[in-house]
Image (tube, rainbow, N blue to C red):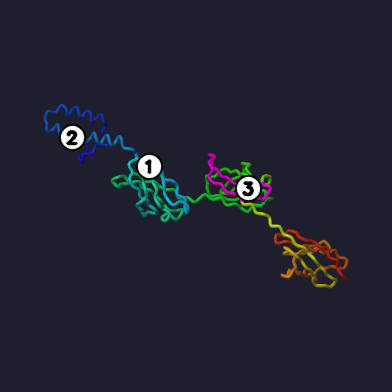
Amino acid sequence: NDTTGTIKDNTTQEAINTAKELVAAITDTDKKAELEKAITEAQKQLTEKETKVEVTGKANPFILHQDRYLSGTYTGDITAISVDVNGKRYYGGTVKDGEFSFYALDKIANLGDVVTINLHGADKTIQKSMTVQVKEADKVTQAAYSVKDSNITGTFNNPDITKMNIVVNGTTYWGGTLTNGTFKFYALDKIKSATDEVSMNFYNANNELILSKNLTITVPVVTSGEITSATVAVGDKNIVGTITGDIKSLGVTIDGVTYNGGTIAADGTFKFYVADKKFTAESNITIVGYDKSKNTLSEMSIVVSK
């Protein structure tokens, strides 16, 4: 043992028992008392050492912009904690019954922040330090989907996600392909209506659910419109006429050749320049009105006036 009265790391119960036997044979009362006192202290230290619970700790990941507290569990004689964020130390938090927490919403701001939790004993020394994983909140971003689309597609940011299913009106379908943070799931034969209730569920390799998200189904915009009049005469520069509804652009076919253009006024009148296009009184002319997505809304044949 050293001169400070602390037992050596390799001191055993057997060594103490042997020392007791040797001291018992000493006849010098004062010397014997001194050595028995030392043996009693050594026995106390050994007992404390053998019964001391090892200090361990586990810190939960901190979800950026979502979690308010750092948290985790510990074993051993821990009475306080501190937190290091990018080298700056903060004291506080609560330690109780093997669990700890520390308010950190105002301290951890970036995904790259380096965060360490320190567990302190009664003497204020650090008994255990743990690095905290700072993570983004799990997120799935769905691309626009409408009922007639073949696939549900999108992205995810959790690399642990390896499989998925969709639930359509209570029926579960497994499948899809997930790679490099993107997913695709064939749903043309599963989703029949924009009012279907559909959820997407994402799992890790152990079939543990990581995230669920309701599918947003885009309701197709129903457009309508009509070409109510269209006239042209031999020698005219323009076909002129009127339209109603959602017609936003025009196309004209003259003797099998199609041209796009024209101008539509706010009052529903239009004109389509044809002076540079060869046509006669016998020409077959058709005009078509389209919505903004180029869907055909109305079609009319034009009789050329002489």
The one nearer the camera, 3 or 121, is 121
For the C terminus, the quadrant is bottom right
Label 1: element kind:
loop
If the image is split into quadrants, where does the N terminus sit?
Answer: top left
Q: Residue 7: percent from the left, percent from the top?
A: 24, 37
Mark 2 to mark 3: distance in Å? Answer: 79 Å
Residue at the spot x=50%, y=51% of the render? 137
Closer-to-camera residue (200/263) = 200
For the residue carrying disc 1, how many other residues have a C-alpha within 10 Å: few (<14), some (14-19), or many (20+)? few
**Quick check: marks 3 and 1 in contact, CB under 8 Å?**
no
**Number of other residues with Cα within 10 Å of mark 3, as a class: few under 14, some 14 to 19, many 20 or more:** some
Q: Which mark is residue 37?
A: 2
Q: Position of residue 88 (x, y in %)?
A: 36, 55
Question: Are the residues flagged by discs 2 and 3 in contact, CB closer than 8 Å?
Answer: no
Indicate which label's residue lies in the foreground, 3 or 1: 3
Is residue 269 rendered to the left or right of residue 44? Answer: right
In the image, what residue occupies the spot 39% across and 50% down? 102
Residue 27, placed above or below residue 146:
above
**Magenta stretch?**
191-215
Q: Amino acid at mark 2?
A: Lys
Q: Which residue is mark 1?
A: 98
Q: Secondary structure at mark 3?
A: loop
Please tell me whether mark 1 or mark 2 is closer to you in this view.
1
